[in-house]
Amino acid sequence: MRRKCRLEFVALVFIAACDTFPLTPTEFDREFQQATFVLQPQADAWLSTRSAQVVLERRFRGRSEQHILLPNPTAISGENYILLRSHGTGRASIGRFQPLELLKSAGGIPYPFTAAEIRGMTTETDALGQIDWAHWTNYSGLTCVLAFRRFDGANRTIPAGAGAMDLAMRNCVYGTVEEALAPIAPQGASFAATGLAEEAAPKMLSPLAGPLP
């Protein structure tokens, strides 16, 4: 009986060790992409926007991600969405914002955009900070935007325990660029869980910026 207990204890230690064993970046990404999404109340969304329909979240070893699905009233294929990914507090965990890597969690670059359009994005500053976006139009009233923001860990708009949060959005609408960007614009988005006043809006970092200082 004593020998059996010892073997069971060793097995439990081995399992625990396996669970925390370091993974290569490739292995980590593969395991993270296989993590299960769980439906969340809209009140638990990291970013609150009036047009949100469904909030999904998944977690794996210190990285967490939310997909906020938006309505798509157009004939453009694919989903409109806001993708949010948090990073740990370590500099190696945060790194620089790589839009193409972030978009892998949404199935890659969404139609109708291309990698060339991402490299030629427009950069602007609004009341929430910096936003980088590309747009596509059929010149008949249909507009799509692919937009990015990085949220600095120096502010309180990111999930507890995170050092940074990255955002990507694809949104196609019958309307203007401003209407397509509305879900993540100052007048359309808020951080309900933090209760920040407008004058305390966070400083954003460009998704094309280098490593954080």
Image (cartoon, grey):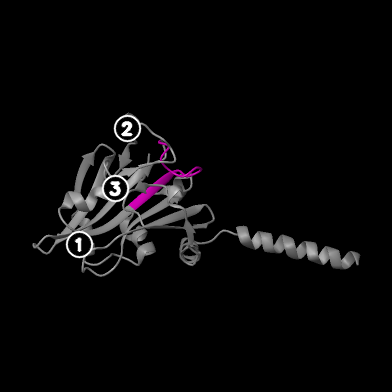
- The residue carrying mark 2 is 198
Give the residues in magenta. 155-167
Identity of the residue furthest to the left in this view: 139
Is 139 displayed left or right of 92 in the figure? left
CA gap, disc 1 to disc 3? 23 Å
Mark 2 residue type: Glu
Give the dominant element type of the magenta stretch: helix, strand or loop: loop
Disc 3: which residue? 184
Q: Are marks 1 and 2 in contact (CB under 8 Å)?
A: no
207 in relation to 29, above or below: above
- Label 2 secondary element: helix
As rendered, which of 111 and 27 lies closer to the eye? 111
Kind of residue at disc 3: Ile
Q: Residue at x 31, y 40 (%)?
A: 204
| Image vertical order of residue 36 relative to residue 123, above or below | below
**Answer yes or no: do the residues labelled 3 and 2 have beta carbons within 8 Å?**
no
How far across and down, in percent of the image, does residue 82 sit?
34, 55
Q: Earlier in the sequence, mark 1 or mark 2?
A: 1
* Residue 164 is inside the magenta segment: yes
Q: Residue furthest top?
A: 199
Q: Is residue 208 visible?
A: no
Quadrant where the N terminus sits is bottom right
Q: Sequence order check: which comes first, mark 1 or mark 3?
A: 1
Q: Which mark is residue 116?
A: 1
Q: Quadrant of the C terminus?
A: top left
